[in-house]
Image: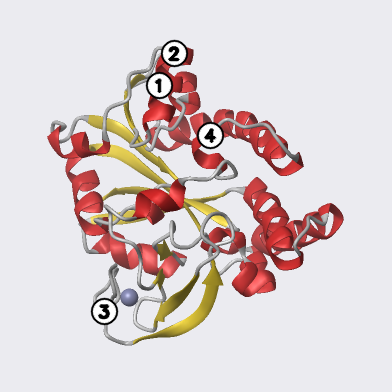
């Protein structure tokens, strides 16, 4: 178990408990979420160590790593995922200004995004910790993802784009990872980091039931300001923010389930919509954000 006495993002001691969140997906255990007054990041307290956390990923309902199509929420998740693949590809092209290049996808899962990029003639490298996900990527798309430890063996300045779709919030060695991203990206390359945003309206509405806290798997809960501080520590800077409009609906649906023990499709859609309407005026309030990053 790891007990933080300082903020894992900025090392400030000005931290205090904000919420207590239950792990609704796997263990049903409560975890404290702390808030850092200095950088505004939140983080999960008393987290399982890297060697202990494996059991918290063992659930059929943990859809990020599986391909189950059971249930309305999962079906919607998979429907939306196929739509968002194209959007992700467009973001990479738009912000790198390239039609092809070298791409590193960290947390490549079952390989759907890499397959999409490979089809578009990008040269792709994938890193994925989950063995069954790597096997699916191999049999379905012929993609041979490497183990995450390989991140530190890759050649410096070798990628035009690095993507981490909802991955950084799971990484124990946060600063080592971000520093390595800075080393691997080419001088004119772009890094794309997608993470949930606890400053969104849906997070506000659901509070301790907000599904994207997802403790203890999510170790950090970023705000845009805390992400900018983290990047600046590693000679990186934020150049754009892309809102992920579907996430507010998906997260609201799960949150309704956690709050009331059952789903409420209409209520979830309404809250997702309210959250997105606020984010239309300022994308920094969207439920999930893609931070587009380059070297300072
Ligand atoms: Zn902090």
The quarter of the picture where residue 126 lies is: top left
Q: Which residue is mark 3?
A: 6
Tell me where residue 188 appears, x and y as whole percent: 26, 37
Using the image, tell me which numbered label, if any, was put on residue 139. 2
Coloring basis for residues: secondary structure
Of marks 1 and 4, which one's residue comes earlier in the chain? 4
- Closest to the camera, between mark 3 and mark 2, is 2
| Residues marked 3 and 2 touching at CB (< 8 Å) | no
| Mark 1 secondary-structure assignment | helix
Q: Is residue 11 above or below residue 72?
A: below
**Taking 87 as reference, is 283 above or below it?**
below
Whether label 1 touches label 2, CB < 8 Å? yes
Question: Residue at label 4?
Answer: 66
Of residues 218 and 102, the one drawn nearer to the viewer in this rendering: 218
The answer to whether the residue bearing label 4 lies less than 8 angstroms from the nearest atom of ligand 1 is no
**Residue 219 position in % (x across, y down):** 39, 62
Which element carries disc 2, helix, strand or loop?
A: helix
């Amino acid at each position: 178990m790891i007990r933080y006495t300082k903020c894992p993002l900025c090392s400030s001691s000005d931290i205090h408990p904000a919420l207590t969140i239950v792990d609704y997906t796997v263990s049903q255990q409560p975890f404290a979420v702390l808030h850092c007054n200095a950088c505004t990041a939140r983080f999960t307290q008393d987290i399982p160590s890297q060697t202990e956390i494996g059991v918290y990923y063992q659930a059929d309902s943990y859809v990020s790593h599986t391909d189950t199509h059971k249930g309305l929420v999962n079906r919607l998740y998979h429907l939306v995922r196929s739509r968002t693949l194209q959007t992700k590809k467009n973001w990479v092209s738009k912000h790198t200004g390239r039609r092809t290049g070298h791409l590193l996808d960290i947390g490549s899962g079952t390989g759907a995004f890499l397959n999409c990029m490979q089809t578009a003639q990008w040269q792709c490298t994938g890193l994925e910790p989950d063995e069954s996900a790597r096997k699916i990527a191999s049999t379905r798309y012929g993609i041979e993802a490497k183990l995450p430890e390989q991140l530190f063996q890759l050649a410096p300045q070798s990628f035009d784009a690095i993507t981490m779709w909802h991955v950084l919030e799971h990484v124990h060695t946060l600063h080592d990872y971000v520093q390595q991203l800075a080393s691997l990206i080419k001088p004119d390359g772009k890094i794309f980091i997608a993470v949930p945003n606890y400053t969104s309206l849906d997070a506000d509405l659901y509070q301790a039931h907000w599904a994207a806290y997802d403790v203890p798997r999510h170790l950090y809960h970023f705000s845009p300001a805390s992400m900018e501080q983290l990047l600046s520590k590693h000679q990186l800077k934020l150049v754009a923010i892309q809102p992920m409009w579907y996430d507010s609906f998906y997260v609201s649906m799960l949150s309704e389930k956690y709050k009331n023990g059952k789903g409420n499709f209409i209520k979830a859609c309404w809250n997702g919509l309210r959250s997105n309407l606020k984010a239309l005026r300022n994308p920094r309030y969207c439920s999930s954000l893609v931070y587009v990053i380059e070297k300072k």
